[in-house]
Amino acid sequence: MMETLQVLLVCSLLLVSVEHSESGQCFAYFNTTSGECTQDLGEAQKSQCCQNPTYGYRESDGECQFCGPPVWSPWTSWSLCNILCGGGVITRTRKCFGKSECENPKEKLHMEPCNSTCCSDKEGWAMWLEWSPCSVTCGGPALVGFRTRKRVCNSSPECGLACEGPSEQTEKCESLNKCPVHGIWSGWSQWSQCSGPCVDKRSSNVIMPIRTRQHTCSNPAPSTDTQPHGDSCPGDSSEQQDCIELPNCPVDGKWGAWLPLGPCSVTCGQGLQLSNRKCENPVPEYGGKYCEGESTKTSVCHSPCPVHGVWTNWSNWSECSAACILQGEIPKRTRRRSCTNPAPSSNPAGQPCNGEDSQVEDCTRLPYCPVNGNWGQWSSYTPCPVTCGMGQQVKTRTCDNPAAQHGGKECPGTSRETLTCSTNVQCPVNGVWSDWTAWGECYSPYEGRTINCKTSGGKNNRTRTCLHREHGGALCEGDQLSEIRVCYDVNGCPFKGKWDGWESWNYCTPPCGSASKRIRKRKCKPDYSEYRPTIRSKVATFVGKPDCGDPPDGIKSERQQCNNAPPC
């Protein structure tokens, strides 16, 4: 028995703990018109959240609740007549928001009779319009799209209930057409061999060897079995490039005419002292053969002369070291040349070529590389912004480490995080005036004196109360707790007068069920000519319902059935 009691005690404590720890969502603003909560502060217990009387609180499975004193929402607009053809009712409602009941808690539904004339067969929806085109135009069963169609309500606004259901429908659809495949180039092939071994400058038109490379529109190839066909690859399928790094072709020399006799003029090798001729028709170039035979008719000066180095033409620029410009790092490209056009002789030693055999330059025309954004450090949380109740602290970070640039991705995630803070201090609740009470009976200012049906003046009053003030909140604005006015007591008093139409209908009572009715009364306009209009210089009021006798038809009130009221 003792063990059973201990188990029950533990279960009870666990239940209490669970109930106490249950929490909902706290909001910094509650809309007393719509009943909606906004400006989410985070999870909190109701007792904490509602320390601030302007906040809203929502349990995990419930509607938003107002933390402040009770207040009525505005009345809704009148509904449409609940019957399309014939007698029905229209209604309007309001809601009470707050921690306790509003004044006159039963006054939340008004109902009045209506007579709907929406009896025509033409009322209601028109035929559905055609379906819109499918949102996808190709792709087959694997790609699902949507299409919509609409219809129009032919009814006037007051007959809107004749159009029940949606005005638009959406359904899935697919296209049986295959999507066109647009062509993409394959990678470039390797460069071909140059079309010749050297640059031919023997004629007036220089013949420069070339090399080529190709790529094909096959990665993928454009589709031909779709409608429309796929687009072909832009640009050319091949490229060619001059082989400017090749040496010039050798030019063999030919003798010119013999010269008159003269001294030997060479400084190396063997010279001619008598008649000579020059190998200049043409001069041998670029390693071409010198003229065959003797250049003189007598003695020959023959000693090898040094050959000085000459640069070849520059090669084409290489590919850039990267495809785009990264921050602070500009890609480079190079080109080269060689001292082989001709190369300097070794014996006797010729002079080497002057200058560098390579050049490097920046690839400044490339696009910038995309830079994906990265978050900077989180800031510290801001101080709790409230001095009572609950608030929200905020910390932020910036996408600047680095910032996204040149088409790079923005930072993923959020730039702002919040933290709920609680002061555990109850906020002041300001006072709110109650409604004025109804005016009381008109009584004589002199105790024991009766003024009913007499021309002697009296007074009556009404009062109000400052409600819901708590925790040092402000008093209600103004200090008038009561109002007093001068009056005459004419309740039940017979008067000469006339019946002057009808008072307004009251609302249907009760506001539901088959017994619901409304009432209006005849309006009696008595002759008050024997009464002074003022009492002690103040405008007098007539209090009570005077008796004007019976109307000519004997009917003092009318009742009207509120047909087709909703069930209670």
Image: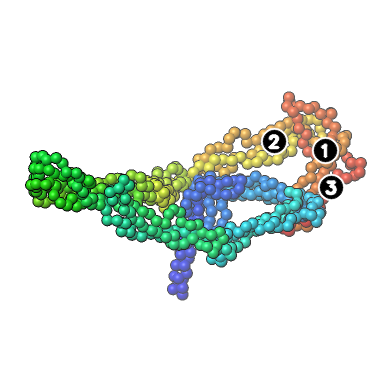
Amino acid of disc 1: Pro
Secondary structure at badge 3 equals strand
Residue 461 numbered tag:
2
Residue holding disc 1: 546
| Rendered location of residue 260, percent (x, y) | 14, 40
Residue furthest to the top in view is 537
Label located before the other in sequence (1 or 2): 2
User: Relative to 54, is 151 above or below?
Assistant: below
Work out how far the residue at label 1 is from the one at label 2, CA to CA, in angstroms. 20 Å
Residue ID at (16%, 43%): 258
Which one is earlier in the sequence, the residue at label 1 or at label 3? 1
Instruction: Give the left or right position of residue 207, taking residue 113 as reference.
Output: left
Whether residues under marks 3 and 2 lie with C-beta atoms below 8 angstroms apart, the answer is no
Q: Mark 2 packing: few (<14 Cα in 10 Å), some, or many (20+)?
A: some
x, y percent for residue 509? 76, 51
Label placed on residue 558: 3
Q: What element carries label 1?
A: loop
Q: Is residue 463 shown above or below 330?
A: above
Q: Position of residue 40 (x, y in %)?
A: 50, 49
Judged by depth in the image, the label closer to the viewer, 1 or 3, is 3
Q: Which amino acid does the dot numbered 3 rest on? A: Glu
Residue nearer the viewer, 226 or 339: 339
CB contact under 8 Å: marks 1 and 2: no
